[in-house]
Amino acid sequence: MVIGLPKEIKNHENRVGLTPANVLMLTQAGHSVRVQSSAGEGSGFSDEEYVASGATIVADGASAWDAQMVVKVKEPQPSEYGYFKEGMLLYTYLHLAAEPALTKALMEKGVSAVAYETVQLSDRSLPLLAPMSEVAGRRAVNVASTFLEKHHGGKGILLSGVPGTARAHVVIVGAGVAGLSAARMAYGLGARVTILDVNLTRLRYIDDTYHDIQTLYSNEYNLAEVVKSADVLISTILIPGTKAPKIVKEYMVASMSKGSIVIDVAIDQGGSVESIDRITSHDNPVYEKHGVLHYSVANMPGATPRTSTFALTNATSAYLLALANHGVLACKENPALLLGLNTHKGKLTYKAVADALGMTYTEISSLF
């Protein structure tokens, strides 16, 4: 199979879909890999490293997209829709519930699109979403620490405080992979941490493991009360495939003190904070509303691309070779991978996306 690796073009997106090690695995299996020149530079991989692993370097995105299978990190941008073609296999993050135009373009061109974020194991874990959730959760605390500084518009406090001063209060909504990663980071830096979730088993685990982290059952009353004292609010709520519910209401954010910061880790899935009305970028990451800073960058892990690329490809490579060897039929043989198939033969094959966009859902088994 001919596999294409284009350079990411989203704002400050420096991750790359394949490392030289991934390319070596594919070429040793008899596949041909076309890498767009400088595709890996943002993550610290030179063209020479890809060539040494057996890849062919191509000059532009069009040449990299001219393949049977394309591997990326982020969802294709509008300028890339013209590269879609019937029967192409696309393997990347898609977040289609927040991307109606992309969904329609994939369907119109007959692309078989496998979304990292909806590949799901039988225990309902999301193996290809988890590594980026880990990065985003930890980065959220770093972001908070930076923007609490006065010259960035924050209230001028240190997360840990110092002896004789109060620690910052970090409130985290959701105790999944991103939420727990954020809690660990904030706890390690010495902040006062409160985490909310509806999963009591998860809360018991956190309570047993981190005795100084306050756990609360998540409901509107508890959330509204604890947010009032939050210096940092990190929302990590995400439902696979569909738009995130607006758990954090605008009146809650308005109750926070001036110079606090709200970070929505799931903004690329529509976001779960009602007061966030736009996606920001690494160039202009925050805006102020109700006197509170709002951070809503949709590709948070892109700021630490080398770590993020290794973390991501460690997970995606588990399915990569199967897709290269067997094409879309690999999805039929693997239940976890089948859940990743969002569009196929011009149909929308992931129900949560169809429901979110008000589009027709087609059961995937009817298309094989």
Image (cartoon, grey):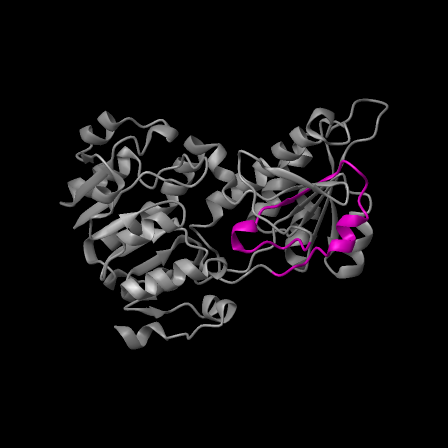
Q: Which residue of the protein is positioned furthest toward the left in this rendering?
A: 30
Q: Quadrant of the C terminus?
A: bottom left
**Coordinates of residue 114 in the picture (x, y in percent):** 34, 57
Q: Residue at x 20, y 58 (%)?
A: 326
Q: Residue furthest right?
A: 164
Q: Position of residue 81 (x, y in %)?
A: 33, 53
Q: Residue at x 47, y 44 (%)?
A: 131
Residue at the far bottom: name it: 366
Give, as a single range, the part of the protein colored magenta.
Answer: 245-274
Q: Nearer the viewer, residue 193 or 46?
A: 46
Residue 73 visible in the current orientation:
yes
Q: Residue 104 occupies which quadrant of the picture?
A: bottom left
| Residue in the image at 21% along x and 47% along y | 3
Residue 199 quadrant: bottom right
- Please say whether residue 202 is one of the residues in the magenta stretch: no
Q: Is residue 91 above or below residue 104?
A: above
